[in-house]
Image: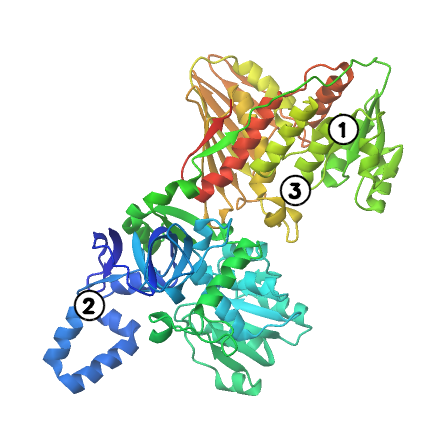
Amino acid sequence: MKQVVQNYKSGELAVLDVPVPGCKPGGVLVRSAYSLISTGTELMKVSEAGMSMVGKARSRPDQVAKVMQSVATNGVPATYRKVMGKLDSYTPLGYSLCGVVEQVGTGIDDVKVGDLVACAGNEHALHAELNWVPKNLYTPVPDGLAPRHAAFGTVGSIAMQGVRRGEPQLGDVALVIGLGLIGQLVVQLLAASGVRVVGADPDPVRCELAERLGAAACGDPASAAVEAAVAELTGGHGVDQVYLAAGGGSNQPVELAARLCRDRGRVVDIGKCRLDLPWNAYYEKELDVRFSRSYGPGRYDPEYELEGRDYPIGYVRWTERRNLACFLDLLARGRVDVEPLVSHIADFDDAVETYQRLKDGDLKAVAVLFRYPEHAGEAEAPAVDVPAVRRSGTASTPARSAKTPVRLAFVGAGNYATSMLLPHLAQRDGVTLSTVVTTTALSAANAQRKFGFAEATTDLDAVLGDKSIDAVFVVTRHSSHAELTRRALLAGKTVFVEKPLALTEDELAGVLAAVEESGNDRLQVGFNRRFAPLLQEARKRFGARTGPANLRYLVNAGRLQHGSWYLQQGTEGSRFAGEGGHFIDTASWLLEADPVSVYAVATSGNEDLQVVLRYPDGSTATISYVTTGPAGFPKETLDLVADGRALRLDDFVRASVYGRKRWVSSRLPKARDKGQNAELAAFIKAVRTGGPMPVPLESLVATTAATLAVQAGLAGGAPVTLARAR
């Protein structure tokens, strides 16, 4: 089998062929599916190995003390041979993984061959294809939890033990210093415990990630932002606990902890940082300094870890293994989310290159996973189904008289509905705004007053049962789109649903099941950009093509304001899942086909995405979706190149086509026309005449499936095939 090793003397990293470990009594042999690189602990070891002998000595004074003791006991020559022999040996890396039980040792009855388990330990959960793991260092993975997420079990247990040492209570305020992998998990665990959290880290990307994952506020510890946030949340008293999850040689974390902690607060050291405690500051507040020892009680106890002797729960409630099981349970129930922490998934065979990229800074990451060959298919999700559209029966859609108004109902009246849709519809002849439905009475009343709805209500069933209403607009939060669309289709309504149509494959299947059951395929998703007059004109000027095309779409999405519901990824999906369909639909419309595969990669925290779509004729579209660009830069720029011609769109303000002749549009006013008005006109015409919907349902389904495949591609780190059902 293969295993990642390091020579501490030379710093060499290698993937070696080594013998398969035996399956001893009291444990199980586990074939790795995913193992997690600790970007703190492991990179520290890798960096130390590359130092000179003097540098190694300076970085590990504890080991130097042991050497000096050995010299006093055994003499210089014997000690030298012993030290050099130990340094010039391969040592393992890794301590957190998920895998499948391949063999069960005697005395084990809680798992069987084929079970998925999470494993811990720097001697038993190594970056290796196979590991023998004793009973108290593994735990079964809950049903439905992805193996790549379960691989976080050990680092999650470290964070959990740190939080337990702080003894947080409901309503407390805590400060987490250091927002690396452990710090991000501590933030989530505290937030799940009802604690308001302030984070401190010099990296703004990590600060924003922590805020997305539950922190009330984050900032650079050298700025005034952290101190101001603590003062606001605590009324000037200071935080109840400080969790030190930072590394390095700076004494700033412990000094900041003393300054921002309340009188008799607790300071918990989880990471390995400098601890020169300023005596006066800690004495005057009588601060309680605590250390958190790794995964929890049982760590470093051979009888517990190797011999399987558990501590009675009445005396030790949370042990290593119980912490591990608890963290996996939180993951499975969605109380903690590790997916946003996954910066990169590397094939196990590329381990050496991955470590080198991390060490050199080429790969900036919060968490990196190794994926093992036997289990690559489990995470990379090589295919996402594009379900077939089936229609049983025919829904009656009679043409209407031009004099008969089209009666519309709106479900939802939020910002997009009131700013981008209703102003166009309120002024359109032949349209009656019949009813607005919202979950709160006041928002319905406001929409009625502003746009002249005949009725305002919170009763959706009454609207769906009203036969006089011709079409229903679903303009609610993303998580409700699929279900509301399904219900409206079954009620026989023509439906306009704002993007996205669905957030999961099951939701998409539910919508199509409603189409098949009712025979009603009268559906439009709010992909408006293909209707933009400027882009329509540019496509016409570009003309038909004969060869494959290359399309580049840069979306400077910008940062969201703190508190935006778009950040609620657990319920509302990722930001790209919410609006990425716009850009995929535009690319597919320009290329006149639906994509056949998707490849997606992301920067740290999955904030900036590169999505590559491949089309049947060999064309490709690359969508660069970035949130870290400058506010003054245009939001959307698009280039299409094929057959010696090029089309360019500049943020729906100007377009140009280059070929034998050059065409450049006049510059539009600042009020960019992204096609909403034309899209609504086409939709109303289809409702009035009973003619085809503006976009074929098959295209809407393909775009939705491709958007869903982006998340699958990010999780698996490999291209995802869009498999069309027959």
| Quadrant hosting residue 167 | bottom right
For the residue pair 684 and 653, the one nearer the viewer reads as: 684
Question: Which label sits in the foreground, 1 or 3?
Answer: 1
Which amino acid type is marked by label 3?
Answer: Ser
Q: Residue at x 45, y 75 (%)?
A: 311
Question: Is residue 502 rendered to the left or right of residue 5?
Answer: right
Residue 625 location in percent, x, y?
52, 39
For mark 1, what is the residue? 491
Which amino acid type is marked by label 1?
Answer: Ala
For mark 3, what is the residue? 479
Residue 350 location in percent, x, y?
30, 46
For the residue pair 341 and 512, the one nearer the viewer reads as: 512
Badge 1: how crowded within 10 Å, few (<14), some, or many (20+)?
some
For mark 2, what is the residue? 87
Determine the secondary structure under disc 1. loop
Question: Is residue 384 rendered to the left or right of residue 704?
Answer: left
